Image (cartoon, helix red, strand yellow):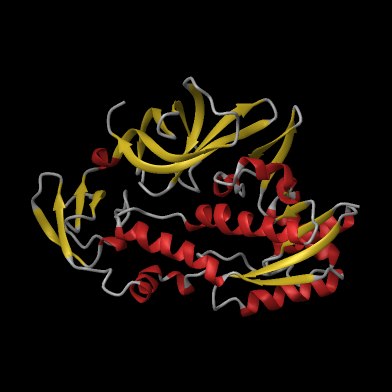
Amino acid sequence: MAKVLVAVSGGVDSSTTAAVLQQRGFECLGLFMVTHDRADKAQQDAEAVCRHLGVPLLIADVRREFEQVISYFVCEYKSGRTPNPCVYCNRFIKFGRLWEIAQENHCQFIATGHYARIRQVNGTACLYEADDTAKDQSYVLSMVRRQMLGHILLPMAELTKPETRKLAGQFGLPTEHKEDSQEICFIPDNDYTAMLEQWCPGILQKGKIVDTEGRELGEHEGISKFTIGQRRGLRVAMGRPMYVVRIDAETNTVVLGRKEDVMSRGLVAEQFNWLIDPPREAFEAVVKVRYNHKGDAAKVYPLPETGEVRIVFERPLSAVTPGQAAVVYLSRSDGRQIAGGGWIRQSIKEP
């Protein structure tokens, strides 16, 4: 009987994951990670689920390791970039520390409640979109190390969210009706600017808002309150829609422009994490530049000497945001396979 360490977060997805794997004959060991000081309720829910299933539960206090995620979060905003902490955390904490604990407890696999699929292709584990593309979370798994894929189980891949809740009810799980969290786990009430000020006093410095010609339009209260493509909350009346087109951390300046000024023909992604054999030649793909982006057709140019990729879209794309992940998908007969992902370093106005 194979042994699997299940990351039980206290939500319905991870709870159902544990129940499904137990039903399939796996020896399950639960793990709850304490990543911040407000995890008590989630921990109680995880404990209730594991008691109900008769699954032993480990509690791992990873708050010290999680400071790496918070440091990344703050540094990205200080640099005028928009971070994606879930992608970062999945690489370094959830699927890094999780596998270490699994090995310490003689587990052959780790499992989470993510909606994505692991397929075996010619004996190699590959990451694919989930069947329910509306719920698909393959984007946030794009930075997981390739060698990890063969050790990961994702039983939610075949389910829609309503099907998951129905299954949770059949298992009698206490999390059946628990609402999904819509916020970053370590940001209470989704007020990230208040947390930034707490972690890095003085980070919110007033500065100028200018147009693309350098004309002063107003004053902002901190570049961390803005992201590329933002249109609302600018507090600048121009008589026409204006968008954030650039954030300059060195001068503490927010630059506004018209809709066409926020369009890009491509991007450069750094620290690219390949989940396939790294290609040497350019290839066609679909690329997502944010979690809720459906993806756009593009040509991908690997740059092996720098570890970057250059991506050129078939049509201009709005709000390509430095700091977000660019995730490359390959269209296969059995679904869309994730070729890899990297951090957007810069957008490209002309191909």
Q: In this view, does 315 lie to the left or right of 330?
A: left
Q: Is residue 165 visible?
A: no
Q: As displayed, is residue 195 above or below residue 146?
A: below
Q: Residue placed farthest to the front in the image?
A: 104
Q: As displayed, is residue 16 above or below residue 48?
A: above
Comparing 239 with 154, the one in front is: 154
Q: Is residue 172 left or right of residue 82?
A: right
Residue 260 in picture, x, y percent from top left: 25, 38
Q: Can residue 73 be seen in this view?
A: yes
Quadrant position of residue 44 = bottom right
Comparing 289 with 276, the one in front is: 276
Residue drawn at (19%, 51%), measured in percent from left and top?
255
Dividing the image into 4 quarters, which one contains the C terminus? top left
Comparing 14 with 252, the one in front is: 252
Quadrant position of residue 168 = bottom right
Q: As displayed, is residue 104 above or below residue 239?
A: below
Residue drawn at (14%, 49%), measured in percent from left and top?
211
Q: Residue placed farthest to the top in the image?
A: 281
Residue drawn at (31%, 50%), measured in percent from left and top?
228
Numbered-mark total = 0
Residue 118 in picture, x, y percent from top left: 71, 41
Residue 257 in picture, x, y percent from top left: 20, 46
Q: In this view, does 54 lie to the left or right of 207?
A: right
Residue 7 in picture, x, y percent from top left: 70, 61
Residue drawn at (36%, 60%), measured in percent from left and top?
75
